[in-house]
Image (cartoon, rainbow, N blue to C red):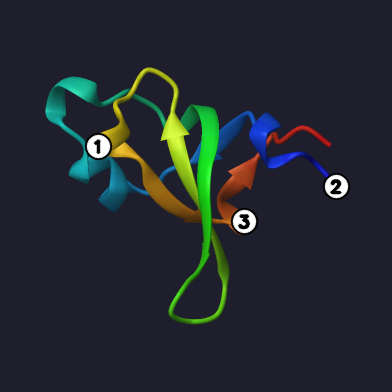
Amino acid sequence: MADISEIGLLKMDEAELLQLDPESRITGETYAVEKIVGIKIGETGEKLYKVRWKGFSESEDTWEPIENLTDACD
């Protein structure tokens, strides 16, 4: 199982991208992850990971389900 601190990339959906500050948006749909800063159980019982995006501020962290993870380290 991968150490969650080593997860490299995460896919953001369009709604999350639109929530980001316009000056912070990156084109494309795959973004580099700086680190995972939290884990919680969502309303539907799924595990969510709070992602700190590389090059983005703490205020732009997002909660993501594991199925959004792509190209993660093994």
Q: Spatial distance from mark 3 to mark 1, Cα to Cα?
A: 21 Å
Q: Which residue is mark 1?
A: 59
Q: Which residue occupies 30% across, 48% down?
A: 16
Q: Amino acid at mark 3?
A: Ile
Q: Amino acid at mark 1?
A: Ser
Q: Which residue is mark 3?
A: 66
Mark 3 or 1: in front is 1
- Do labels 2 and 1 touch, CB within 8 Å? no
Q: Is residue 71 above or below residue 49?
A: above
Quick one: label 3 or label 2, which is nearer the N terminus?
2
Q: Which residue occupies 62% across, 56% down?
A: 66
Q: Is residue 5 above or below residue 40?
A: above
Q: Which residue occupies 33% across, 24% down?
A: 56
Tell me residue 63's x, y (percent).
42, 53
Q: Amino acid at mark 2?
A: Met
Task: Tell me where residue 71 sits by quadrant.
Answer: top right
Q: Which residue is mark 2?
A: 1
Quick one: label 2 or label 1, which is nearer the N terminus?
2
Neighbour tally class for label 3: few under 14, some 14-19, many 20 plus, Cα within 10 Å: few
- Do labels 3 and 2 touch, CB within 8 Å? no
Q: Nearer the viewer, residue 63 or 17?
A: 63
Instruction: Judge left or right: residue 22 versus residue 30.
Output: left
Q: Is residue 40 above or below residue 71?
A: below
Q: Nearer the viewer, residue 6 or 65?
A: 6
Label 3 element class: helix
Name of the residue lying farthest toward the bottom: 44
Q: How many numbered discs, if any?
A: 3
Task: Tell me where residue 24 sits by quadrant.
Answer: top left
Q: Spatial distance from mark 3 to mark 2, Cα to Cα?
A: 13 Å
Quick one: label 3 or label 1, which is nearer the N terminus?
1
